[in-house]
Structures are given as C-alpha cells and as structure tokens.
Image: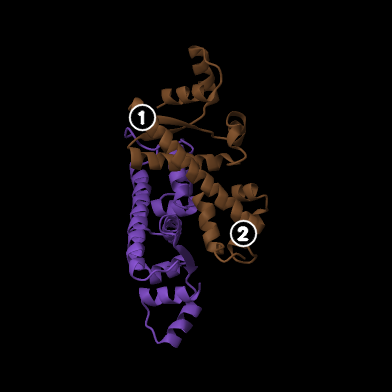
Chain colours: A purple, B brown
Amino acid sequence: MAKYALNPLEFQCLRLSLGLDETKAAEVLKCSVEELQQWELGQQPIPELAEKKLLEIDDTIEMQVLNTCDSIEAMFKKEPKRRLAFVVYPTQALYTQYNPEFISLLPVTELYNTAAWRIKKECKLVLEVEIGLVPLDVDSYKAFREQAGLGESRESRAKWAASQL
Amino acid sequence: MAKYALNPLEFQCLRLSLGLDETKAAEVLKCSVEELQQWELGQQPIPELAEKKLLEIDDTIEMQVLNTCDSIEAMFKKEPKRRLAFVVYPTQALYTQYNPEFISLLPVTELYNTAAWRIKKECKLVLEVEIGLVPLDVDSYKAFREQAGLGESRESRAKWAASQL
C-alpha cells in the first residue's frame, strides 16, 4: 500500500462525501457491492485503482466548483443577480440524454448532483448568490420551448430552469 | 415555506453531503425513514425544523473545519510536522463513551466522521498536512496507556493514534 493511501474508514468517508451509496459506488468502480463492503470493513485491501478513481472524481468536482464560481462571479459583474437556476437530472437516462459531456468525468447523475450541491454551497458563502437546483421536468421543458420557439440546448434548459424558480 | 427553503432534491443533497444514510438521518431528525423518503420525493413538505437541523449541522461542521485547521496551523508554526493523527469512533457506543462533548452538536458518530474527513481534506489542501483518521481500538489503546502509564484523556487518545500511523 502506498504510504499515504486511504485506510478503510477514510475510503468510506470519501465515498459518502461524494453522495454515493454502496450500489452507486459499485457501479462507478465496476465492482460488486460485496467487494466494496469488504474494502470498507478492512477485510480486503482497497485496490489502488478504486481509491484513485474516487479521488479523481473528488478533484474533478472541486475543480468544477472553482471554475463555476469564477464564471458566475464574472457573469454577475455585468449583470448583478442574487438568484440563479442550475439544471440537474432526476434519472440516469435523462442525465445521459441531455448532459452527455459529463458522463466520462462524473459517470452517474448522483455525482453531478454532488457537484451542483457543492457549487450551491460555495456560491452562497463566497458570492452571496442563491442557486436553485432544478430537476429537469421533460414535459414542462418541452412546453416551455414550444411556447418560446426555442431548440434544445444548454441555454434553453437554463432559461427553462430560471422560469421554475 | 420560506423563500429560499430547500427543495426535495437539495434536501437530499444536503443529507448525503453529511454522510448520512436514510436510517441515520431519520435518527438525527427524530422521524421515520418513511417520512424522510416522502420529503425527498416531494410527496410531503419538508418540515422547517428538519431543514434547519441539517443546515445547522453543516454549519457546525464547517466551523469545526475552520477552527481545527487554524489550530493545526498555529501548532505547526512551533513544531513543523507533515503528518497528524485524528481519532474517530467506529461505533456509536464508543463515540458516546469517549467523546460525549460532541453529542449535542453532532449526535451520531457518522457526522463526526464527516467533520474529520472535511478537516483532512482541507488541511491537505491548505496546509499540506496529511491527517490520518484512526478508528479507536479500545484494546490497543488500553495496552498503550498501561505501557506508557497514562490516564484516559483526549491527549492520551491523540498519543495512541499518533503511534498507529
């Protein structure tokens, strides 16, 4: 084991901090729930790749938090607002369909939610901006697009979400 | 509902960010798992007190992260180290017995773990100090105290934990 590798309790803390239950973590790590449980109980050594994967995801999320907060700060210099809507995806199918650019970095929608939550928390603390996390409602979104004559795009989703606050 | 109250998804993100599964969250919020599920599915309005409780716990943890990192920074000015041990409690019984001063703020040991994990993460990032989270092993701790002629105290626990790194 590497000198500073995570012990079983730390590995579990990391998994939980990412908002992953055992089933979702097993999906992300491509292992069985039983294997994961054995790692967290210290009955089997934690594979280096599993630890690396979760640490990378945590880094990815932290980077996204920093970048998004910076963008929001820059945006709000031109156009001051105190509220903002952020689209999240209530199912894996919707996440995969509408937000595929994140799949390789944050493979399950729960991880995207975790990123969104941390962004919400940080923006409130640092920028005093309130972000609402709005789960995509396909019917409502389609009706909104029709009425406004908009195509499907990230911008259209953001506009729809803002209308839901 | 207050203007900026959390919606069901945000409430769930908050709960997960605290490292609480449904059972533990129900214990902390003194509700049933079924009630909690209904709140998170949007089938029942989230009681203001439940939201307040989890937000307060999150604030408590963030404050503890700040204070602990400050203390560690101050301590390391005199005595530079790169590694540090932090005792955590593998069961609720041990947490209650050995660490009762936190019970009112962070009622379950999982919340203490979450605080410890965030402290570990922050100290690594900001101070480049590696903190190891060491679950209390009562037999090993007692043998250590006997050998070193130490009474039970927070300091003794810290010394034992340091010997485990």
Q: Nearer the viewer, residue A104 or A19?
A: A19
The subunit carrying tag 1 is B
Q: Secondary structure at mark 2?
A: helix
Camera-near label (1 vs 2) is: 1
Q: Which mark is residue B136?
A: none
| Residue A136 horizontal/vertical position (percent) | 47, 71
The image shows a total of numbered marks equal to 2
Query: Looking at the image, is A7 positioned above or below residue B160?
Result: below
| Residue B104 horizontal/vertical position (percent) | 62, 40
The subunit carrying tag 2 is B
Q: The residue under label 1 is which amino acid type?
A: Phe
Q: The residue under label 2 is which amino acid type?
A: Gln
Q: Earlier in the sequence, mark 1 or mark 2?
A: 2
Q: Quadrant of the N terminus of chain A?
A: top left
Q: Quadrant of residue B142?
A: top right
Read off the residue under disc 1.
B76
| Residue A161 horizontal/vertical position (percent) | 46, 73
Q: Going by the image, does A52 lie left or right of B29?
A: left
Q: Residue at x 61, y 38 (%)?
A: B103
Q: Quick check: do tags 1 and 2 share a chain?
A: yes
| Residue B16 horizontal/vertical position (percent) | 51, 52
Read off the residue under disc 2.
B37
Q: Quadrant of residue B100?
A: top right
- Res A143 visible: yes
For label 1, the crowd category at 10 Å Cα-Cα, with few meaning under 14, some 14 to 19 and many 20 or more, is some
Q: Residue at x 52, y 27 (%)?
A: B137
- Res A103 visible: no
Q: CA distance from mark 1 to mark 2?
A: 45 Å
For label 2, the crowd category at 10 Å Cα-Cα, with few meaning under 14, some 14 to 19 and many 20 or more, is some
